[in-house]
Amino acid sequence: MTDKPVIPNLTSALRSNIVESPNVIRKASGIRLFGKRIKSIVYSTDVAVIANCDADAILAVYPWTPSTRILEAISKVANVPILAGVGGGLTKGLRAATVARFAEENGGSAVVLNAPTSLETLHSVRRMVDIPIFYTVVNETTDLLAYIDAGVNALNIAGGRDTTKLVAWAREQLNDTHPNFPIIASGGKTDEQILETIRAGANAITYTAYGMTEKTFHEKMAKYREQQN
């Protein structure tokens, strides 16, 4: 058996401090979205992070009413697929469907509906867009098969500290009818937590980049101060 080949890494002096995804995510199987294999997904709306990260895709979901201006800004700097949040809670029905259509027309590769999206809203979005729909699962009360039958193409599992357990539950629910259904999930803060989530059945992992702009800036400023002494 030959050793696993080393992957050459090309970068530049001005792009040496990109936000890197945890290496353990590479152990995931990945999902194919319009032919592109996705394993690591950065969860951020910080355009500076989005423009300077090595993630395979962007999860652009946030806790306010979806804004087409935010999506437009993200689409201008992202060079990987965007999974665009389009509501589902307060933003629902025709409004969610309209935002979803805008996302598709502005380069979104998929849309994400938050819990507790109603089946009525899901139907509205499904009629409006051709791109895949991700549905966010937050607990074990969701009737997964009902949402899949209504047009959901993949699950985004976000159960906080119970995410690994929730991924395993979802796989068990879908094992007989949809054994290879795509699941992305938040991986946690450590390699061990991420690996547990992958082993539970997640095909791709989302990771947060909160504070990365400030952290990187503080590190650079400290280095600049040392150089000035």
Image (cartoon, rainbow, N blue to C red):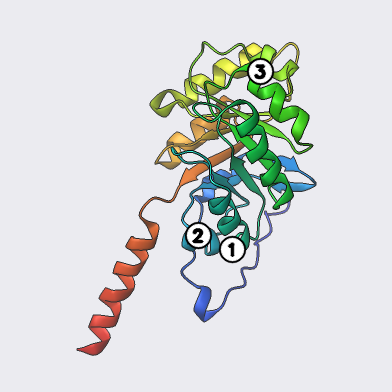
Q: Given this view, does label 3 or label 2 mark the residue nearer the observer?
A: 3
Q: Is residue 196 left or right of residue 173?
A: left
Residue 20 showing in the rendered view: yes
Q: Which residue is mark 1?
A: 77
Where residue 221 appears, as percent x and y from the top left, is 29, 75
Tell me the mark number nearer the camera, choosing from 1 and 3: 3
* Among numbered discs 1 and 2, the one appearing first in the sequence: 2
Amino acid at circle 3: Glu
Give me the residue at 49% from left, 25% from top: 164
Q: Are marks 1 and 2 in contact (CB under 8 Å)?
A: yes
Nearest the eye: 82 or 207: 82
Residue 29 showing in the rendered view? no
- Helix, strand or loop at label 3? It is helix
Counting from the top left corner in percent of width and height, residue 203 is at 64, 34
The tag on residue 120 is 3
Mark 3 vs mark 2, CA separation in Å: 32 Å
Q: Disc 1 and disc 3: Cα gap in Å? A: 33 Å
When the figure is inspected, residue 68 is found, relative to residue 76, above or below; the finding is above
